[in-house]
Amino acid sequence: MVVRCLPGNQLMCARGAEFLERLIQLLTVNNSAANMLSLRVLANLFAHSVGTTLLCCNVDQILVHLEYVVTKGLNLCDLLIIGSYAVAFCDGDKQVDIKGTLLSILTKMLRNQIDKEAAFRVLVAIGTLLSSHRENAGALALSLETQKAVSLWSGIVEPKKVGECAKVVENILA
């Protein structure tokens, strides 16, 4: 994909809102190939800072889609996008409302029936958000009952990384 290389990423992001609007339109059509292509492009935009900046400036539009996806089913690209947002917004006390939305979406994801690899990625994203913002995120996680959702996964023995990651997140929440 062209957006994975810096010149391609810069070229596409130079179109700004027009480019993102087209990608979001592709997410709403009833065509799984178009949906997947759009999600892959969005996920790959995080490969360079210009793409990350564009996505972070338009996070609300993307999060609306991700909240909808939680109810209809997840795929790897959705998890890559939300994990990348967790990393992008993990620093500092800014954007508390976005962190709250991300945490809410991630908590809902854990409550849904997802496979163990997906659960691991969600747990890592939750841990990323919480570890950088313990006080405010901890209070928010408490109100969202994130700890209950995380504890559902702490007893997983195979693969070992899922249960271990859930325990680390539980310790952050404690």
Image (spheres, rainbow, N blue to C red):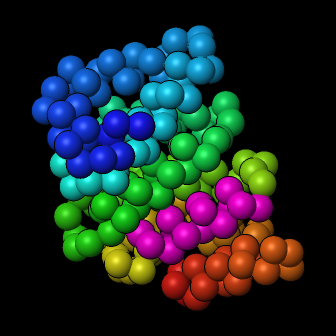
Left or right position of 171 against 103: right
Q: Is residue 12 visible?
A: yes
Residue 39 in percent (x, y) is at 48, 34
Which contiguous range is marked in magenta? 116-129
Residue 97 in percent (x, y) is at 30, 54
Left or right position of 58 against 42: left
Q: Is residue 76 above or below residue 73?
A: below
Q: Residue furthest top?
A: 30
Of residue 45 and residue 112, the one placed in the foreground of this image is 45
* Tally of numbered tags: 0
Q: Is residue 58 visible?
A: no
Q: Residue at x 21, y 20 (%)?
A: 18
Q: Quadrant of residue 61?
A: top left
Q: Residue at x 50, y 74 (%)?
A: 127
Q: Let me know if residue 75 is in the magenta part.
A: no
Q: Main secondary structure of the magenta part?
A: helix
Q: Quadrant of residue 166?
A: bottom right
Q: In which quadrant is the C terminus drawn?
A: bottom right
